[in-house]
Amino acid sequence: MNTNILVLTFLFITSLAVAQNNSIAPKYSNEFLAIGVGADALGMGNAFVAQTAGASSSYWNPAGLIGVNKWLEVNFMHAEYFAGIAKYDQLSLAHTINEKSAMAFTAIRFGVDDIPNTTQLIDNNGNINYDNVSSFSAGDYAFIFSYARKLPIAGMTLGGSTKVIYRKVGDFARSWGFGLDAGWQYQVNPRLKFGAMLRDATSTFNAWTFTLDEETKNVFLSTGNEIPQNGLELTLPKMILGVAGNLPIGKGGFNLGGEIDFDITTDGRRNTVISAKPFSIDPHAGIQVGFKEFVKIRAGISNMQYTTELNETKKFNVQPNIGLGIAIKGFHLDYAFTDIGDASVALYSHIISLRLKLDKPKNAMK
């Protein structure tokens, strides 16, 4: 185990050192994977790395898959952004192998369909011809395969993920990407838990291929745009550290829980609370009040940043999030109401996710 940690640390440092001096590592690469999954997590401001313990742990922290206590757990989420223009979907399946290990698969799609293609709106004679307007779709896909295992130290688990990324913009561009994630959790006692998630541990590589016909290239040149070239894009590592707590309220079955996370990015200065080069730190936190496991009310804050107003003054904005969870036996329904922009713009979206916990089929026990 120590050897694996040393190898992972070496690869992380090496890829970071190379990418910091390379123009192929832009900020905000593969950002659709930074949105988050599951209305339970989104309602808590995405502060979920330490407490995650279900099928969505494949995304949040693979070490949390040990918390799957059924033969199969299914998690599905659907969200729509910008008045339904963009669709965001996630499906996770988690399976307990034995009492010490579990595995999972997660599929994510963020896409915009029916985008007008107006590159041929003006024909060769300079006339506007609306019959030349077609449509295309732009979609980002991620497929995550995860495994988790308990460590010899009581309460400690380790997990890892391999992810395959496919991004497509009509017939013009597409890319394939590959990356690795690593996660760790430590349950100190029933009330305190720590977690760490290293995303894109060795940097995630996306190889882009562009296919443009001569007419489209001419449109790009005549409008002052550069013709995109085939190339490689890197997503630099990100470390997320979290601590979660849970306390009973009285003796009636009520409880209060919460978590605070710190996202440490390595792609230079970002508009975060702590902005530096090469590291920036973005804190976010969430709380939830519950009655046993039946009902949970959630709230969280995230996306803390400074924005510049029209009068050149700076304003500190915080993204608010609220949510509600209901559980009946093996069925969980979660809802979140989140602001996907800053607080002044107020672009709120409704997020709904379902979780099913299934026992092993009886005929499979024979």
Image (cartoon, rainbow, N blue to C red):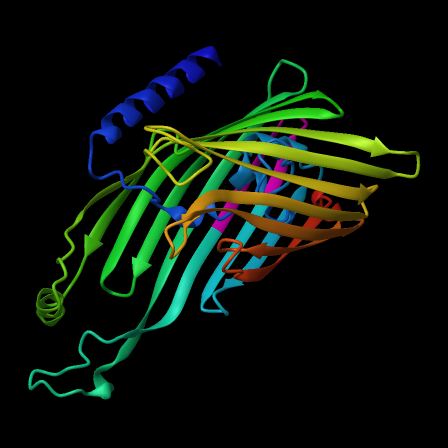
Q: Is residue 19 above or below residue 72?
A: above
Q: Residue at x 31, y 58 (%)?
A: 168
- Percent position of residue 228, x then y: 16, 55
The main secondary structure of the magenta stretch is strand
Identified at 56% across, 61% down, the residue is: 348
The percent coordinates of residue 231 (x first, y second) are 18, 45
Q: Nearer the viewer, residue 339 or 15?
A: 339
In this view of the protein, can residue 159 be seen by the observer?
A: no
Give the quarter of the figure containing the C terminus.
top right
319 to the left or right of 354 = left
Q: Position of residue 361 (x, y in %)?
A: 72, 47
Q: Residue at x 55, y 52 (%)?
A: 91
Total count of labels = 0
Residue 84 magenta: no
In this rendering, is residue 288 above or below 17? below
Q: Looking at the picture, does residue 59 appear above or below residue 181?
A: below
Residue 178: name its quadrant.
top left
Does residue 326 appear in this view?
A: yes
Is residue 153 placed above or below 345 in the rendered structure?
above
Horizontally, is 7 left or right of 229 in the view?
right
Q: Is residue 3 left or right of residue 259?
A: left
The front one of 49 and 82 is 82
Point out the residue furthest to the right here. 251
Instruction: Name the residue at the top extreme.
Output: 2
Relative depth, front residue between 96 and 169: 169
Q: Position of residue 329 (x, y in %)?
A: 80, 49
The residue segment tinted magenta is 94-107
Residue at (64, 31) in percent of width and height: 66
